[in-house]
Amino acid sequence: MTIPFERTRAIIQARELLKQLQDIGESANIPTWLRHQARDLLEHYPSFADIEKAHKALPDLFGPAPPFSRLRGSSDVDGVIDATKSNERF
């Protein structure tokens, strides 16, 4: 059974994967079409502010937006992310 925190962590991990796929420096062997697909998906991907709004509206489905370790989901904080900045690009 997936708990809200795990669902939110998966969304954030998917964002990180898409960022890596579109970054030629991190994944030089990725085909151009896949790199462009990742870029296009990221353009409309939910921001941390969107995740926080989803959490507040549906806390049984979505956990809160960070701060938490963005990649590991542990209690070790990598940095505080201000979810109120809706124009911020990740």
Image (cartoon, rainbow, N blue to C red):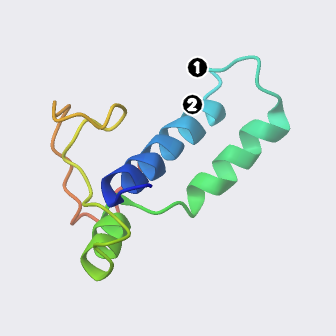
The kind of secondary structure element at disc 2 is helix
Q: Amino acid at mark 2?
A: Gln
Residue drawn at x 65%, y 47% as measured from the top left: 39
Q: Position of residue 5 (x, y in %)?
A: 31, 53
Q: Nearer the viewer, residue 86 or 71?
A: 71
Determine the image quadrant of residue 33.
Answer: top right
- Relative to 29, residue 61 above or below: below
Residue farthest to the front, as pictured: 1
For the question of whether residue 16 can be seen, the reply is yes
For the question of whether residue 86 can be seen, the reply is no
Determine the image quadrant of residue 7.
Answer: bottom left
Q: Label 1: few (<14), some or many (≥20) within 10 Å?
A: few
The kind of secondary structure element at disc 1 is loop
Q: Position of residue 72 (x, y in %)?
A: 33, 31
Query: What residue is shown with label 2?
Result: 20
- Relative to 68, residue 44 above or below: below
Determine the image quadrant of residue 75.
Answer: top left
Residue drawn at x 75%, y 48% as measured from the top left: 37
- Relative to 7, residue 33 above or below: above
Would you say the residues marked 1 and 2 are in contact, meaning their CB atoms lie under 8 Å apart? yes
Q: Which mark is residue 26?
A: 1
Residue drawn at x 65%, y 24% as measured from the top left: 24
